[in-house]
Amino acid sequence: MASLVVGAARVAQGLMRARGGTVRVPCGARGVENFVSSPTLTQLDQYCERVCHVPRVPPQKVTVIGAGSPVGRIACLFLKQQPLIKVLSMFDYDEENNVIGEAQDIAHIDTSTRVEAYQGIGTLMDAVCDADVVVIMGGPGGGPGMACERQLFLQNMAHVHAATRAAAERAPHAVLAVQTPPLDCNFALVMHTLKLLKKYDARRVLGVNAISAMRANQLLASITGSEPGAGAVPVVGGGCRCTRVPVFASKAAGIPRKQLEHMSELVRGADDIICRVKGRREEACLSTGFATARFVTNIVQGLFSRPTTIDSALVEQASPESCYGLAVCATPVTVGAAGVQQYMVPALSEAEKALLESSKCDLKDLLSLGRCHATGEPYRPPHCRYQPTSLAMAGLCPDCLRAHAVV
């Protein structure tokens, strides 16, 4: 009898998929209706996939966690305009962000992408269900300095951890794009959480380092007078101020070395500059949202259209010995149907090699911080740098300490 029920449910759901139909159930928040599968049908579908081995049909769905945040709203605005995305699922933990209202607003844009809205932690599982790409963003924005980044991680890690576990359970095939700052810590948190859950695939977890590459492209174009899209400037290392290393040398022939060093500092310190100019310690919402949307669009194109190159993504490298000796490092990658299919390691000038070498300790430290919070291991500040005398200084490199007048 049970097999007949399962078979009937399977046939019914197959017909709905063939006709492009969905199941309408209440969202639960403010009486707004949503298009999601009921829990019963979802469980039956997962059971049948294990038993019947029916080929998976991707719904071309992108879920944005933190869609009600300032950066998330901008990213969703651009993602709604992408024809390859059939379903845009917007989720936010915080009711003050009113993601349902934001989704209603974005849904008025006359494109074919269907918009779903989920608000509150109780709807997280439905938001990520069967997603092909899960973008983890939102949380408090970054401020200047490494000390702030460590404090920021402690504020943001809970929602990143919850999103990772939900995606592992309800969207095991999804590509996870981690954007929540600080990038290096949260990428490690996602990676090791998935490893503990035995759901980790190195090809399908990427750190969104798009804003660093975009800034480098624009800066080079403004100095050389070239088109910004003519030559992409890769960014290697990590995604934080003390770990990102823009590779200008191969694209900027004829520019003096001293000027290249100043350009690198501008890219590395861009977050601090914007915070000071805005005067309200806000992050760069507009440019970061646009860069994130372009990064996600490239992933979707790679999954469903053609292999696509991304200028800079933080990934676990397939061959650490050929990637500056780093197991986890941001480099250009090519995304295909199975996720990352090619890792490209750009050649560095002597100045860039020195800058990357001085950044390695900070990168390994931030990755270790994320790993320890995922696995429960005790965190110990690195010994290769300044030895702190108080918890407030833990893990700060000498450059950051001098920049913030700690020493």
Image: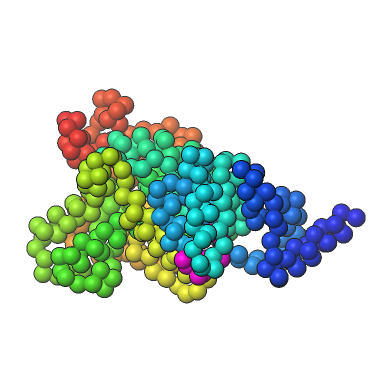
Residue drawn 33% across and 34% down?
A: 381
Residue 219: percent from the left, percent from the top? 20, 61
Residue 202: percent from the left, percent from the top? 48, 57
Q: Which quadrant holds the C terminus?
A: top left
Q: Nearer the viewer, residue 288 or 24?
A: 24
Q: Which quadrant holds the N terminus?
A: bottom right
Q: Work out whether 202 lies above or below 346.
A: above
Residue drawn 11% across and 59% down?
A: 259
Q: Nearer the viewer, residue 282 or 201?
A: 282
Q: Work out whether 52 lies above or below 185.
A: below
Residue drawn 40% across and 48% down?
A: 70
Residue 280: percent from the left, percent from the top? 28, 39
136 sits left or right of 41 in the view: left
Residue 256 in view here = yes
Residue drawn 15% across and 69% down?
A: 224
Q: Residue furthest right?
A: 1
272 sits left or right of 160 in the view: left
Q: Nearer the viewer, residue 8 or 290?
A: 290
Magenta range: 81-88
Q: Is residue 87 inside the magenta stretch?
A: yes
Residue 91 in view here = no
